[in-house]
C-alpha cells in the first residue's frame, strides 16, 4: 500500500472526526482553506472586482463553496466544479427533545434521510449540530459536539423470539437513552455546556432553535489483513468533500491558479440525503448565486455569463457501491466494481446520474492524467437507482456534469467501509481534473 494512500486516509480520519454534521463539516473545510491562503467572504457584503481572480470561500449554513480564480481568466472563461455534499443519514432531534419513561431519560428523534436503522442499534452516539440563540437582541449560531452520550438498545431475543427478523418502528423503537432517574433532566440544558466554538456561556432560555443530530462516536480506523480497508461514519459523502478539498489544496500550493484560464471550484452542499431542496442544497440557489456574483465581478454581460457556463464542467462526486460478496445478485451481473480498483464512473439510462459520453471522456482523461485506474457502475435493472446532485446541477445551470465517486460497502450505515487506495486515487483524479488543459 502506498505511503500517499496511508497519509491520505489518516487525514480523512481526522476530517471525519472534526465534521460530525454538515455545519461542522463546512467549518472544518473553512479552517483548512484559510491555512491554504483562502479568504472568507460574507454573502451580505459587497464583492469587489478581484474576488473572481483570487482564492475565496463562502459558507451558507452547512454548505461551503470555494474557488481559486484563474489569474488568466477572461470574460466567459469556464469553471471546473467539484460538487459534493456534507450531510449523511442520521437521527435528527425533535422539538421538546427530553422524554422520560420508567426512570429512563430518552431523546425524541426522527429519521433524517435513508439510514440503515439497524446500524444505529447498540452503538454509543454523540449529539452534534448548532444551537441558534438570541442574545442582546441578535441571533447567533453556536456549535456543539458531545462525546459518547446516548444509545438505542435492542430488545433481547428472550423477550421476542423473532428479534432476528428485525423490524423497527421509527416512532417507538428508535429513541436513544441518555440518562436515568432524573425526571427534570434537560438535553438542551446539557448541550449549553457542550459548545465548541469558544463563545460566551449561554443559558437554555437563550435557545430559540436548533439543528441537532445523533452521530457515531467510534473513531474511524483501518482494518483487514493488510489494513487495506477503512471503516468510518459519513463516508457518504465526506469521502468526496475531503477528496475535493485535498485536490484544491494541492492545486494552489504550487500556484497552479496563477497560470489558469478556468476557475477551480469546490461546491459542498447540504441536504442531499433528503432531496437537496433547501437554500444550502444543490436544488437551491447557492451555486448560481456565487456564479452570478463572480460574473458581475468579471464585468460580464448576460451573454458572456451564459458562455462561461457553457464552457464549464462539474464532477458530481458522491459515493457508489462496490459489489457485495454476500449479495452479488443485487448487482448488475457484468458490471461489478471491485475494492482498490479506482473511482467509479456512475451511469444510469434514466439520468438518475448525469453522466453522458462527453462527461465520461472528461473523467477518463482526468484518470489517465493522474495515472489512476477507474471502473464503471450501473445498477441491476431490477433495483431502483439512487440519485445525486449531478442531475440537479445540470438541470439548474445547464452545466455539463458527470457522476463519479469511490465505492463503498454498507452505504447509509452508521459505519461504512471503503478501500484505502481508492481514496487516494479519487483525490489524484480530482486534482488532475482541475489541471486538465481542456475539459470538452
Image (cartoon, rainbow, N blue to C red):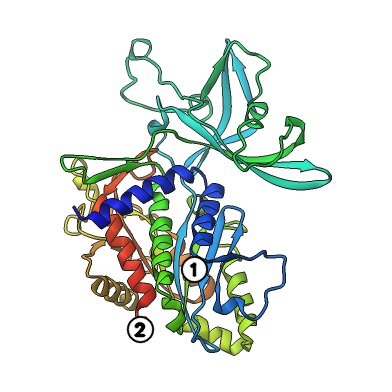
Q: Is residue 288 left or right of residue 410?
A: right
Residue at screen point 48% across, 50% down = 273
Q: Which residue is drawn at 36% across and 77% down?
A: 435
N-terminal-most mark, 1 or 2:
1
- Number of marks drawn: 2
Coordinates of residue 50 in the picture (x, y in percent): 62, 79
Q: Name the residue under label 1.
A: 393
Q: Quadrant of residue 342 in the image?
A: bottom left
**Whole-percent x and y of residue 426?**
31, 61
Provide the secondary structure element on which disc 2 rests: loop
Side of 293 relative to 266 (left or right):
right
Is residue 366 found left or right of 119 in the rendered image?
Answer: left
Helix or strand or loop: what does disc 1 sit on?
helix
Q: Position of residue 287 (x, y in %)?
A: 56, 68
Q: Is residue 61 above or below residue 247?
A: above
Indicate which label's residue lies in the foreground, 1 or 2: 2
Q: Is residue 352 visible?
A: no
Relative depth, front residue between 33 and 326:
33
Which quadrant holds residue 327?
top left
Residue ID at (35%, 53%): 384
The Cα–Cα distance between marks 1 and 2, rounded to whole angstroms, is: 23 Å
| Res 410 quadrant in image | top left
- Closest to the observer, 362 or 238: 238
Residue 363 visible to the viewer: yes
The residue wearing badge 2 is 437
Q: Residue 160 carries which label?
A: none
Above or below, 185 relative to 148: above
Amino acid at each position: 500500500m502506498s505511503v500517499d494512500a496511508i497519509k491520505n486516509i489518516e487525514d480523512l480520519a481526522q476530517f471525519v472526526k472534526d465534521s460530525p454534521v454538515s455545519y461542522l463539516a463546512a467549518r472544518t473545510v473553512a479552517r483548512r482553506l484559510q491555512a491554504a491562503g483562502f479568504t472568507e467572504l460574507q454573502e451580505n457584503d459587497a464583492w469587489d472586482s478581484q474576488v473572481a481572480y483570487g482564492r475565496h470561500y463562502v459558507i451558507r449554513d452547512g454548505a461551503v463553496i470555494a474557488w481559486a480564480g484563474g489569474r488568466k481568466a477572461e470574460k466567459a472563461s469556464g469553471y471546473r466544479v467539484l460538487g459534493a455534499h456534507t450531510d449523511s443519514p442520521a437521527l435528527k432531534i425533535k422539538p421538546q427533545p427530553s422524554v422520560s419513561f420508567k426512570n429512563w431519560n430518552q431523546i425524541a428523534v426522527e429519521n433524517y434521510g435513508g439510514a440503515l436503522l439497524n446500524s444505529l442499534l447498540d452503538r454509543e452516539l454523540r449529539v452534534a449540530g448548532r444551537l441558534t440563540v438570541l442574545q442582546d437582541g441578535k441571533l447567533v449560531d453556536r456549535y456543539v459536539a458531545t462525546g459518547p452520550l446516548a444509545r438505542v438498545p435492542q430488545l433481547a431475543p428472550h423477550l421476542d423470539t423473532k428479534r432476528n427478523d428485525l423490524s423497527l418502528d421509527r416512532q417507538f423503537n428508535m429513541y436513544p437513552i441518555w440518562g436515568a432517574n432524573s425526571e427534570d433532566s434537560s438535553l438542551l440544558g446539557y448541550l449549553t455546556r457542550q459548545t465548541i466554538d469558544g463563545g460566551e456561556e449561554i443559558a437554555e432560555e437563550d435557545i430559540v432553535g436548533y439543528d441537532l443530530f445523533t452521530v457515531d462516536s467510534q473513531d474511524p480506523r483501518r482494518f483487514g489483513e493488510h489494513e487495506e480497508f477503512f471503516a468510518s461514519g459519513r463516508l457518504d459523502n465526506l469521502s468526496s468533500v475531503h477528496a475535493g478539498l485535498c485536490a484544491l489544496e494541492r492545486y494552489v500550493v504550487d500556484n497552479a491558479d496563477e497560470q489558469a484560464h478556468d476557475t477551480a471550484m469546490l461546491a459542498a452542499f447540504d441536504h442531499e440525503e433528503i432531496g437537496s431542496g433547501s437554500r444550502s442544497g444543490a436544488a437551491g440557489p447557492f451555486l448560481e448565486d456565487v456564479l452570478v456574483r463572480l460574473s458581475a465581478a468579471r464585468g460580464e454581460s448576460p451573454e458572456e455569463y451564459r458562455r462561461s457556463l457553457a464552457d464549464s464542467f462539474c464532477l458530481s462526486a458522491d459515493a457508489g457501491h462496490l459489489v457485495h460478496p454476500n449479495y452479488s445478485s443485487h448487482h448488475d451481473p457484468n458490471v461489478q466494481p471491485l475494492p482498490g480498483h479506482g473511482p467509479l464512473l456512475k451511469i444510469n439510462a434514466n439520468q438518475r446520474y448525469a453522466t453522458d459520453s462527453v462527461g465520461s471522456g472528461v473523467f477518463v482523461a482526468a484518470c489517465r492524467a493522474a495515472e489512476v485506474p477507474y471502473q464503471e457502475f450501473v445498477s441491476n435493472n431490477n433495483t431502483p437507482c439512487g440519485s445525486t446532485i449531478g442531475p440537479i446541477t445540470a438541470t439548474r445551470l445547464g452545466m455539463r456534469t458527470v457522476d463519479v465517486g469511490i465505492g463503498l460497502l454498507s452505504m447509509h450505515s452508521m459505519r461504512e467501509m471503503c478501500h484505502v487506495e481508492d481514496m487516494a486515487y479519487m483525490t489524484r483524479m480530482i486534482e488532475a481534473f482541475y489541471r486538465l488543459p481542456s475539459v470538452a
